Image (tube, rainbow, N blue to C red):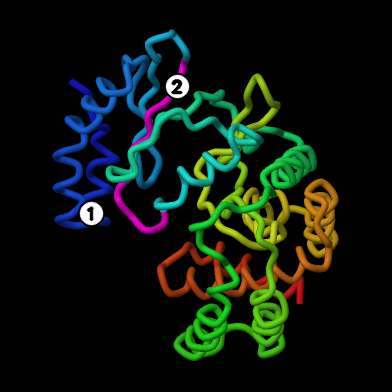
Amino acid sequence: MIEIPEGFARDTVDREGEPGKVWIASLADLAEGLLARWGCTLAGPVMHGQVGVVLPVRRSDGTPAVVKISFPHPGNVHEPAAFAAWGGRGAVRLYERDDAVFAMLLERAGRRTLADLDDVDAAVTAAGRLARRLAVPAPPGLPRLSERAGEWEEELRKDAELLGRPLPAHVLDAAIATVRDLGRDQPDTLVHGDLHYANVLQAGREPWLAIDAKGYVGDPAYDAITLLRGRFEDLLAADDLRAAVLRRLDLFADAAEVDRERARRWTQARAVTAAHWGRLHGDPEWVVMATEHLAGLLT
């Protein structure tokens, strides 16, 4: 019998309520059925993230793989389509999928991630190069970020008012201007959408492979913020914070082959959004303040 980690089960029920309780109760049987259907055997303990479990398995031909099962959520809908479009280019290969139950059979990569690299510059550069590999023509049916520009502008204004305008007016205005200038006119390019350090695994056939994609369509510069908000402590320890932030942005932009100014503007706008979200949803105070500072530095 497959054992679902207790902590994951408890957190899922606490977060999702009754739907989470029902899903957790069915998860072990669901996993057993998927392993049988896809001809896999369990090859290690069940792992998990925040919204799903990952089962290390071996396929019938001995190939190592993982079965990933996510809690049904709108944010997880487009992940398999992104992996299918990449076909193993810069991301783990998709072997099987069952979209009805939010499950995939995926290539197994290593356990080491970009977050484990001591050299932050090397990690940022590797992520940028990966972003370039993932920037392929988008298939139909994936969410276009350009279609959310109006919603973003409205949320920026509404949240600022709700929170009593915690950021200076010129910082908020710059974010709104970016959404107007760049948000509605974006390339028809597939982007990861959550390219942070822990979502890039060391591998064999390529140095690094992406996992946990959102599968958005838009500007590749959109992903730059995750590499600044990740490993925040390294930035905050710098003697010249603004110079350190701009250096990290430049490393990403050069490696990803995106325009530096677009990367700066997207990062500033998304930092404002992230700071608002953090205040509304209880992020640690130091994270909110660091994100607000980041938004100001890039204005």
The residue at the far top in this view is 62
Classify the position of the C terminus by image quarter: bottom right
Residue 294 visible in rendering: no
Local secondary structure at mark 2: strand
Q: Residue at x 65, y 35 (%)?
A: 89
Q: Is 90 above or below relative to 226?
A: above
Return the x and y of residue 277 as percentages of the image width and height. 48, 71
Numbered label attached to residue 256: none
Quarter of the view holding residue 206: top right
- 20 left or right of 197? left
Q: Residue at x 59, y 27 (%)?
A: 112
Residue 224 visible in rendering: yes
| Whole-number angstrom distance, CA of label 1 to CA of label 2 | 30 Å
Label 1 Cα neighbours within 10 Å, binned few <14 / some 14-19 / many ≥20: few
Quarter of the view holding residue 174: bottom right
Quarter of the view holding residue 297: bottom right
The residue singled out by tag 2 in the image is 65
The residue singled out by tag 1 in the image is 14
Label 2 Cα neighbours within 10 Å, binned few <14 / some 14-19 / many ≥20: many
- 87 left or right of 78? right
Return the x and y of residue 222 as percentages of the image width and height. 66, 61
Return the x and y of residue 90 as percentages of the image width and height. 65, 36
Classify the position of the N terminus by image quarter: top left
Q: Foreground residue, 227 or 59?
A: 59
Magenta-tinted stretch? 64-75
The answer to whether residue 267 is magenta is no
